[in-house]
Amino acid sequence: MVEGEPGAPLPGLTDEQLLRFRQGRALFDRAFTPEEGLGPIFNQARCVSCHDLPESGGHGAEPVTKVSHYDPDTGCDPLTRLGGGLLQESVVPAMREAGLRAERTPAEANGVTLMFPPQLFGLGLVEAVAEERILSRSDPEDGDGDGISGRPGLDPDGRLARFGLRATHATLDSFVEEAIRVEMGLTTPEHPEEMLPNGEPLPPGIDAAPDPEVGDSEIALLSDYVRFLVPNRLVTPPDPVGEEIFRDIGCADCHTPTMTTAPNDNPALDRKRFRIYSDLLLHDMGRELADICTPGSVPGEWRTAPLVGLGLRNRFLHHGQALDLSLAMEMHGGEASAARDAFNRLSPARTQRLIAFLKSL
C-alpha cells in the first residue's frame, strides 16, 4: 500500500524526478507579483495559499465562490462571459487605483456555492489508474437495480475525467493549468488572454506583463510536483469494526476503498495499490447538495469525494457546511439515500465506531 507523510514525495522516484518534485514545490509555494502577471483579478498569489493543510499540497481553509445558471431545458451555463464559474475576489493595486473592484455574483446566477480546496496528495496515482478500472463500476442506467447509477465525467474533448469536484479534467496538466489561470490570473500558452472582471474590459495599462505569463515548462513542473505527491497515511490505525460497518451500510458501494494503478513506465506509478475511498464517478447526491452545475453535470451531481485525508479536516462536504461527520452523512441524498438511511438506523455504539473509522482516514 503506497502511503507516506503529508507533503512527501512518492517512494521510488528517480533523482531527476525528486529534483523536479523539489523545484515544483518551490514554484507551488512561491508568491507571484503583478509585475510577473498576477491578476489583474485573482484569488491567491501562491498555489500553497489554497493548499496548505497540514502541509504544502494539502486542503485549504479559505473557500472560493462558484456560480452558474441551470435550466432543465437548455442545460448548464457556467456564466463565463460574466466572470463565472469561479469568481475572483482580489484585485491588483492598479485595479484598485482605477476604482475597480473584485468580481460580484452575476444576477443571472441561480446556483451559487462556496467550495473548500481539496487536498492534492496521491493524484499522480489517481491519474495512473486505467480507464477500464474506473468505467467497470459505471452503471448509468442502474442495470443492477441497486439504486446507484454512477457515470463517468467527461472533459470538453470527450475524455474520461477524474479530477475536480465534478470530474471535469482528464489530466493533471489540464487541472493545474486551469488552477493557475483562474485562481491566480496567470495567462498560459493554452489561454493567453486575461480574465475580465465580470466580463467587463480592462482599462489600458492595468496588466503590462507579456502573455503568456507562465510557460509550458512551469506548468509541467507544477504538474509533476502534484503528480509525485504521496497519498497521506491514515491518521490512526483503522478500526476493523468501523470499516465493516462502512461496507455493510453501503458507503463502500461508491467510496471504493482502494485502487491499483495500471502498468506504467515510471516505477513509482507502476501497479501501485493505494487507498482512495472513491470510484471517481459522478453520482446524483440529491437536493441537499444541489447548487451549481458544470457543462458536464447537473446541479445535484458530484464526483465521489475521496475520503483519504478526512481525519485531517474539521469541515466536510464541498461547501464545508457540515461541521461534523454525522451531519455530512445526513446531507447525503439521491443515490446515497439508502446508505444514509442505514446510517440513521445504527445503534449509538455502532455509529460511534463508524465515525471513529472515518476520522482515522
Image: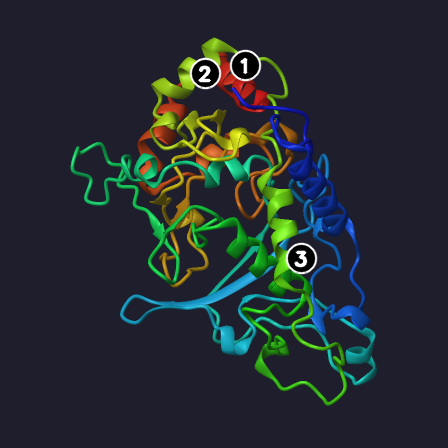
Please identify the quarter of the rendering in which residue 89 is found. Answer: bottom right
Residue 347 can be seen, yes or no:
no
Please identify the quarter of the rendering in which residue 257 is found. Answer: top left
Which residue is disc 1 drawn over? 238
Look at discs 3 and 1 and give the one toward the viewer.
3
Crowd band around label 2 with a 10 angstrom C-alpha radius: few (<14), some (14–19), many (20+): some
* Residue that appears at 65% across and 64% down: 215
Q: Is residue 270 left or right of residue 339?
A: right
In the figure, 48 relative to 95: above or below?
above
Please identify the quarter of the rendering in which residue 180 is found. Answer: bottom right
* Residue that appears at 34% across and 41% down: 131
Q: CA distance from mark 2 to mark 3?
A: 41 Å
Residue 270 in the image, given as x and y percentages of width and height: 47, 29
Residue 26 in the image, given as x and y percentages of width and height: 77, 47
Q: Secondary structure at mark 1?
A: loop
* Residue that appears at 68% across and 30% down: 6
Q: Nearer the viewer, residue 323 or 145?
A: 145
Q: Is residue 60 left or right of residue 141?
A: right
Look at discs 2 and 3 and give the one toward the viewer.
3
| Callouts 2 and 1 close, C-beta under 8 Å | yes
Q: Kindly identify which numbered label has been placed on residue 243.
A: 2
Crowd band around label 1 with a 10 angstrom C-alpha radius: few (<14), some (14–19), many (20+): some
Residue 248 can be seen, yes or no:
yes
Nearest to N terminus: mark 2 or mark 1 = 1
Q: Amino acid at mark 1?
A: Pro
Q: Nearer the viewer, residue 224 or 168?
A: 224
Q: CA distance from mark 3 to mark 1?
A: 39 Å
